[in-house]
Amino acid sequence: MNIILLSGGSGKRLWPLSNDVRSKQFIQLFKDEEGNYESMVQRVYRQITEVSPEAKVTIATSKSQASAIYHQLGDKVSICVEPCRRDTFPAILLAAAYLHDEAGVPEEEAVAVCPVDPYVENRYYECVEKLGALVRQGAASLTLMGIEPTYPSEKYGYIIPESGGEVSPVKEFKEKPDLKTAEAYIARHALWNAGVFAFQLGYLIEKAHSMVDFTDYRDLYAKYETLTKISFDYAVVEKEPSIQVVRYAGGWKDVGTWNMMAEVMADDIKGKALMDATCENTQIVNELNVPIIAMGCKNMVIAASGDGILVSDKEASSHMKPLVEKVSTDVHFAEKSWGTYTVMDVQPGSMTVKLSMRAGECLSYHSHDYREEVWTVVSGKGRSVVDGMEQILRVGDVVTVAPGCRHMIEAETDLDIIEVQIGETISVADKHKYEL
């Protein structure tokens, strides 16, 4: 079975740990069975492979998230990168075309689409497997998963089935209701719409060609920016007459805000922090190398990173987005395919960053027009190439790269380098890549 994981969105609701590069699904606040910290995307991939070891996973994502996915999952998954963000229908269409035209997946094969960020039990992915089995039976063109409501929520859309059975034809869909209406929906066996559905690959390819003018995956990729921004629900699901839903009654949490994330974090404290005995129902996540002390805090979340510090009542944290938009700054931490990039200091005319590279990884061969770089090796071994000249890198070595010089670094072991960027213009756009 093929599974498409949708990994999109920017990082406003879990600020300051999330940003436009590191969205919530990459923050490592959970733990695996061995006690190692893992992120949502790592947890989801682990659960899928525990339930379906043969499942083939493709992540549909934006350019800004591809490096973080490679950093956390390596080459375990395929990645279908959107040239720009166009909502879920174009993203799923592009991923389906990728499977069909680039990966050679047969049209009769079942494909399930899931969000990458729910906090669920393994039973959730057992239900996804069931969706695939129902698709192969061919009783309906689309098969959805509906979440059994635990309370009359006003935050979710609803699926109204024709019956209360485990599998039922879908009667209609409803938008987010008020409390009284939600209670009435539940009385009709309604389910939360979690954005999980499955189909035969050929179904969506045929549907796509009837809605979008393209020949194959590469043609669609080239035209992607011209596609209408529209959700898969509006474009396909709510217009499909042949549709059924599977009822899922296991654990499921949408952890898109700090107050929800705090309920499922592995530890109340991560990083350098202490709480006194009077603190209640409070969580602290500290990515800074300075301690946080909390005293008398109740029902609070405290989060600190290079991008900022949040101190908030848990319920109020759900409404932080307008304030975050007022203090938005350049990203100070990013996961790359080769390791991590951390901004340590910013001054007029200079910026100091720490490059932490994994053994065997390397930076691309590139140059900058407007800045000089000075590297100091603080741990590990590697090599550098500057304008074709190779140098072995050891602890204490200092390398200066003038503007315009082509350069790269390769890590022989895990390698930490302090890089000072100097220039009147320091920008991520100031970069040219070359073949070495």
Image (cartoon, rainbow, N blue to C red):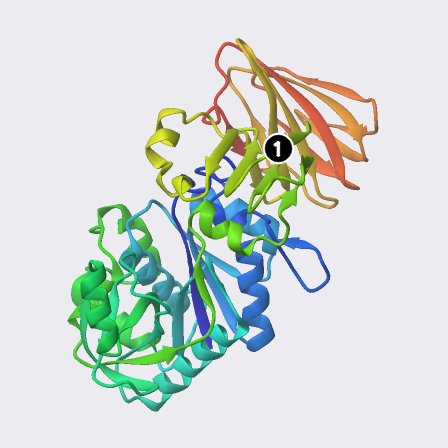
Image x and y of residue 173, in percent:
19, 69
- Residue 436 visible to an observer of this rendering: no
Would you place residue 228 above or below residue 391 in this image? below
Q: Which corner quadrant holds the C terminus?
A: top right
Q: Nearer the viewer, residue 389 or 296?
A: 296
Would you name the residue on which mark 1 appears?
Answer: 295
Instruction: Give the answer, above or below, for where 98 lies relative to 249.
Output: above
Q: Locate residue 255 relative to residue 186 in the image: left or right.
A: right
- From the top left corner, tell me how far across and down residue 80 is, in percent: 43, 56
Along the viewing direction, whichever of 262 and 371 lies nearer the viewer? 262
The residue sitting at the right extreme is 395
User: In the rendered view, would you say 431 is above or below 280?
Assistant: above
Amino acid type, callout 1? Met
In this view, the residue farthest toward the front is: 278
Q: Is residue 350 left or right of residue 355?
A: left
Q: Residue at x 40, y 72 (%)?
A: 112
Does residue 279 appear in this view?
A: yes
Query: Residue at the location (57% across, 28% down)?
Result: 306
Which residue occupies 34% across, 44% down? 84
Residue 6: x %, y % from top left = 40, 58
**Picture quarter containing residue 132?**
bottom left
Judged from the image, the secondary structure of the residue bearing numbered disc 1 is loop
Q: Residues within 10 Å of mark 1 (few under 14, many from 20)?
A: few
On the image, the x and y values in percent for residue 343 come to 59, 26
The one of 229 and 50 positioned closer to us in this rendering: 50
Residue located at (67% from left, 37% from top): 276
Q: How many marks?
A: 1
